[in-house]
Amino acid sequence: MEKYIIIVAGGKGLRMGGDIPKQFLPIEGKPVLMRTIDSFVRYDKDMHVIVVLPIDHQSYWKELCGKYSFTTPHSIANGGETRFHSVKNGLALVPNNGNCVVGVHDGVRPFASNATISVAYDTANEKGTAIPVIDCVDSIRRTTENGNKAEDRSLYKLAQTPQVFKADLLHKAYEQDFTNLFTDDASVVEAAGHPVELTPGNRENIKITTPFDLIIAEALVKHAE
């Protein structure tokens, strides 16, 4: 199979409280987005990497690549109005055939493990779809108009990325019109009538959206070293 990864990096970093978008913030001397790209190239050096960035972030990204001597080959696609539209722009650079398998990943998830990525791609190649998930470890309560009630957490999973699909299946799913119900690629594929396969994720595969997450990320890098 020919492997592609669309890395969506459109965040503006508002929850970080700063002017630098969170995907460009350094973790132990290296920007988040570069670490994210590296995780896929470590898994497969021949991976086709597509980075989706807002147009007004692209010149800054090129400056960072020069500053950090980051030479990993990758293509750039323009960010869209929503995540759905950003993925669709990245998908335009992926061949529309059944020999390609394409993942979609959050640019601010730099800790997807080799095992998480490998199982997702292998499963998608075999069954068409793969969504890495982890168990809920906290108690869960559902709010209602009349208050709230406890739920059985064993019935729920937390979805991660990369969410991986046969390329022709994902192309077909993204022909649908956008709705606010599309929260990730799995929801787009399900709306097109395809069930999704669940695969094991890894707990370290956090999405960096707050200053606290950045502290955790720095600790994870130090521990790995």
Image (tube, rainbow, N blue to C red):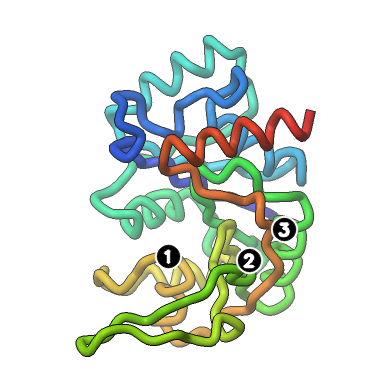
Seen in the picture, residue 114 relative to 24 is either above or below; the reply is below
Residue behind mark 2: 132
How far, Cα to Cα, is label 2 from label 3? 7 Å
How far, Cα to Cα, is label 1 from label 2? 12 Å
Q: Is residue 215 or residue 93 the one in the foreground? A: 215
The x and y percentages for residue 212 are 47, 39
Label drawn at residue 99: none
The x and y percentages for residue 87 are 41, 54
SS state under label 1: loop
Residue behind mark 3: 116
Q: How many marks?
A: 3
The x and y percentages for residue 164 are 60, 64
- Asked if the residues shown at circle 2 and circle 3 are in contact, with their CB atoms under 8 angstroms apart, the answer is yes
Of labels 1 and 2, earlier in sequence is 2
The x and y percentages for residue 146 are 22, 89
Residue at 68%, 43% in the rendered image: 40
- Asked if the residues shown at circle 3 and circle 1 are in contact, with their CB atoms under 8 angstroms apart, the answer is no
SS state under label 3: helix
Check disc 2 and give the amino acid type. Pro
Check disc 3 and give the amino acid type. Thr
Seen in the picture, residue 96 relative to 196 is either above or below; the reply is above
Of labels 2 and 3, earlier in sequence is 3
Check disc 1 and give the amino acid type. Asp
Residue behind mark 1: 184
